[in-house]
Image (spheres, rainbow, N blue to C red):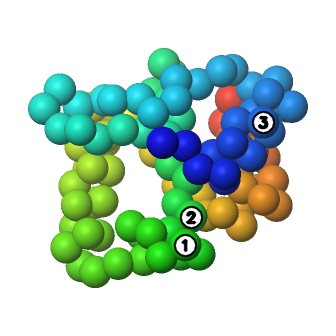
Amino acid sequence: MTSHLEEIFARDLKAVGLPDPIREHKFHPDRKWRLDFYWETGWAVEINGGGWVQGRHNRNAITMRKEYEKLNACLEQGIRVLQYTGEQVKTGEAITQLERIFKK
């Protein structure tokens, strides 16, 4: 399920001409983990809006442990994950950083 913040981010990707990502990419063979945005270059983006909506990223240590487990599994597979808050998406900070990465 995509969020409003993810839709803003996807719109901004198109607006600046960055490559189309795979949305809700299932990257692990045994777990149900998904990445919000993934590119075949090995970069991924997770939009974490939970601080504002009482979602997953605003909960207890067990939930954070599971999040770290997911991110560590990404690194183990060579996937570099950028994480952004809703504010970073709304201000354009997220897109600006991604533009720098893709123009290298």
> Where residue 73 sits in the image (x, y, percent)?
23, 43
| 35 with respect to 21 (left or right) | left
The answer to which quarter of the image holds residue 66 is bottom left
Q: Does any portion of residue 91 appear in the rendered image?
A: yes
- The answer to whether the residue labelled 3 contacts the one labelled 2, judged by CB atoms less than 8 Å apart, is no
> Where residue 30 sits in the image (x, y, percent)?
13, 32
Q: Secondary structure at mark 3?
A: helix
Q: Is residue 90 above or below residue 53?
A: above
> Where residue 16 sits in the image (x, y, percent)?
85, 31
Q: Amino acid at mark 3?
A: Arg
Q: Which mark is residue 30?
A: none
Residue shown at 81%/53% (left/top)? Answer: 92
- The answer to whether the residue labelled 1 contacts the one labelled 2, judged by CB atoms less than 8 Å apart, is yes
Q: Amino acid at mark 1?
A: Val
Q: Does any portion of residue 76 appear in the rendered image?
A: no
**Lower position in the chain sequence, tag 3 or tag 2:** 3
- The answer to whether the residue labelled 3 contacts the one labelled 1, judged by CB atoms less than 8 Å apart, is no
**Lower position in the chain sequence, tag 3 or tag 1:** 3
Number of the front mark, 3 or 1: 1
Residue beneath label 3, please? 11
Q: Which mark is residue 49?
A: 2
Q: How many marks?
A: 3
> Where residue 5 sits in the image (x, y, percent)?
66, 53
Q: Amino acid at mark 2?
A: Gly
